[in-house]
Amino acid sequence: MGKRFLTVLAIAVLMCSVAFLGLSGAAEQKVPAVIVIKSTLWKDHTKSAVTFDHKKHQEDYKIKCTECHHVYKDGKNVWKQGDEVKKCQDCHNEPTIKGEKKLPKDKQKLNLKIAFHDNCQGCHKELKKKDKAKYGKIPTTCIQCHPKEK
């Protein structure tokens, strides 16, 4: 009777584990393959929206989620895959678009334009410095990310 009970218990635990893993996977956020970045923080945009190929960055380029997604506590990024993904403008909600580099440092950290440019353009420029032959065509200028609207 003892062995039989342990066997049944082990099977029950295994089945519950499989069910739990299945449910946790279903709860993951669905991420669109392509994201159009056009913030509602600004009524009028000075440049066109940016089309960001999320799938390509994630799967082809193997960029870690924490390179873009973050929640800082005590100077460390504590965000991890599976945590809620907020829109950048939820935290970076300082709207200055011209003269943003003249803002006090604490306001610059909250400025959406600076956040996008430091993260995206900064990463691309770093990659170009490392290997111009491999990364020479990645966008780093305004027009490359913000094409003229037709």
Image (cartoon, rainbow, N blue to C red):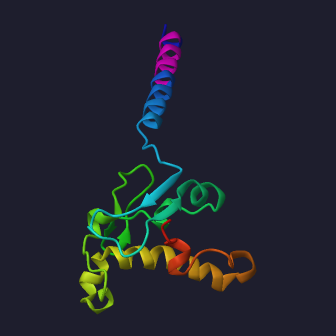
Q: Quadrant of residue 62?
A: bottom right
101 and 28: which is toward the camera = 101
Give the residue at x 26% y 67%.
Answer: 43
Q: Magenta segment: does it hold 9?
A: yes
Quadrant in which residue 134 is drawn: bottom right
Q: Residue at x 49, y 60 (%)?
A: 65
Compared across the picture, whether 118 is left or right of 97 comes to right
As drawn, which residue projects farthest toward the right?
133
User: Among all residues in the image, which is located at the extreme top?
Assistant: 1
Viewed as shown, does residue 36 lie left or right of 54? left
Q: Is residue 48 left or right of residue 34?
A: left
Location of residue 73 in the rendering, given as x and y in whole percent from the top left corner: 30, 69
Q: Which residue: 54% across, 50% down?
A: 33
Q: Quadrant of residue 95?
A: bottom left
Q: Please name whichever residue, 11 or 114, is drawn nearer the observer in this view of the structure.
A: 114
Outermost residue on the front side: it is 150
Of residues 92 and 10, the one drawn nearer to the viewer in this rendering: 92
State the residue in front, 16 or 34.
34
User: What secondary structure prevails in the magenta region?
Assistant: helix
Number of dots carrying numbers: 0
- Does residue 23 sit above or below 139 in this rendering? above
Say if 144 sits above or below 38 in the image. below
Please provide the residue range marked out in magenta: 4-13
